[in-house]
Image (cartoon, coloured by chain):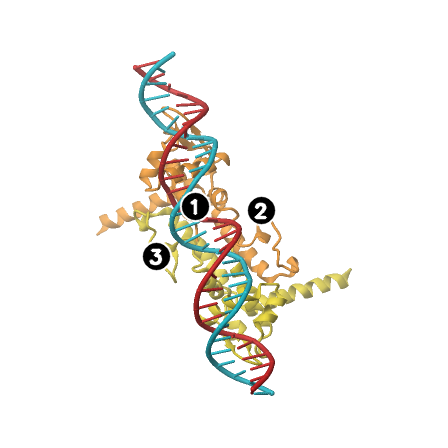
Chain colours: A yellow, B orange, C cyan, D red
Amino acid sequence: MLSQKAKYALKATLVLAKEFGHGPVLIADIAQRERMPRKFLEVILLELRNHGLLQSRKGKGGGYFLARQPSQITLGEVLRVVEGPLAPLPCVSKVAYRRCDECYDERTCAIRMVMKDVREATARILDSTTLADVLKRAESTLHGRDALIYAI
Amino acid sequence: MLSQKAKYALKATLVLAKEFGHGPVLIADIAQRERMPRKFLEVILLELRNHGLLQSRKGKGGGYFLARQPSQITLGEVLRVVEGPLAPLPCVSKVAYRRCDECYDERTCAIRMVMKDVREATARILDSTTLADVLKRAESTLHGRDALIYAI
DNA sequence: CAAATAATCTATTAAATTGATGGATTTAAT
DNA sequence: ATTAAATCCATCAATTTAATAGATTATTTG
């Protein structure tokens, strides 16, 4: 299960994606729009900024904004910052490989092989889905819903 | 990342799969073979037993064994017992659905849609991979290795 | 029946992680 | 100079994780 922090991070970056091009967004605004504790959100945004996904400006007219286009930031990137590796085992992580302590022989560990597949499957999705994709998907669902209503 | 507990659970059930048909296996044996703390393993095995995946016998000649054939127990089942739902969000879990508190509208939540795909992908793998599959896979890797050695 | 064996139950615990909060400080705009 | 924001620093309660110790119950066997 994703942590609360991860959910907040996704929702926050999604807000920034929606507002992209319209100047910085206030932490307080994001917090209110998505019902998150403002102070906790601060921590999260700072972390994302320090990893190069966001930029910020201080003082009046300041706030947060995406460091790149919404189509150039993936969910995988966001999640790795706040949750660590996508892999279910350290020994199948590409970004943060680490040996499993109790493992006798990594090359013949069958659990590892399966978990490698799992990692592959989730990474394929999360590393190919951008913030822009998510926005588009949400929108087209909304339109689909409208269409359905009109059709009744 | 899987918890230590989950790793232990997988390794332990795998040992029981390997020994299936040869009578009960001692907790102490499993613990030693896979280098896990015996007392912690007790807790785990009991939990798996209480969920119907394992059976046990007390006293001399006792121990643990699989409640079903290794080909009839999936990694998904084992993991759900010790780790809870496979889904990355409660709102996309089939077995343990729960609403997300902060969510405005589940039907239009874009994050949810993506995470549904992620759940689907991992469940497809873990719910279709049995303990028998894992054993076979490990073995065939070993044989592949041998063949390679002989070929040199 | 007694002794030995092995799981099971009860309980406690240390350490780490999670999910926050409060207040002082720095940076930038007007 | 004032105001608006992010940023830094420090702390914290609750929960989860990963265990351990010891008493108890069930089973086999001699």
Is B75 rendered above or below residue D7? above
Quadrant hosting residue A96: bottom left
* Disc assigned to residue B96: 2
Left or right: A148, with A138 as reference point: right
Q: Do the residues marked 1 and 3 share a common chain?
A: no
Left or right: B93, with B150 as reference point: right
**Front in this rendered view, residue B133 or B5:** B5
Left or right: A50, with A148 as reference point: left
Q: Residues within 10 Å of mark 3 (few under 14, many from 20)?
A: few
Cα separation between marks 2 and 1: 18 Å
* Disc assigned to residue B123: none
Which x, y percent locates residue D29?
A: 33, 17
- Residue positioned 52% across, 56% down in the render: B118
Disc nearer the start of the sequence (2/1)? 1
**Front in this rendered view, residue A110 or A2:** A2
Quadrant hosting residue A13: bottom right
Secondary structure type for disc 2: loop
Q: Chain of mark 3?
A: A
Cα separation between marks 2 and 3: 31 Å
**Front in this rendered view, residue B87 or B142:** B87
Three-letter amino acid code at the position of disc 2: Ala
Residue A72 in sight here: yes
Which x, y percent locates residue B89?
A: 55, 54
Which x, y percent locates residue A118?
A: 45, 53
Secondary structure type for disc 3: loop
Is B15 rendered above or below residue B91? above
Three-letter amino acid code at the position of disc 3: Arg
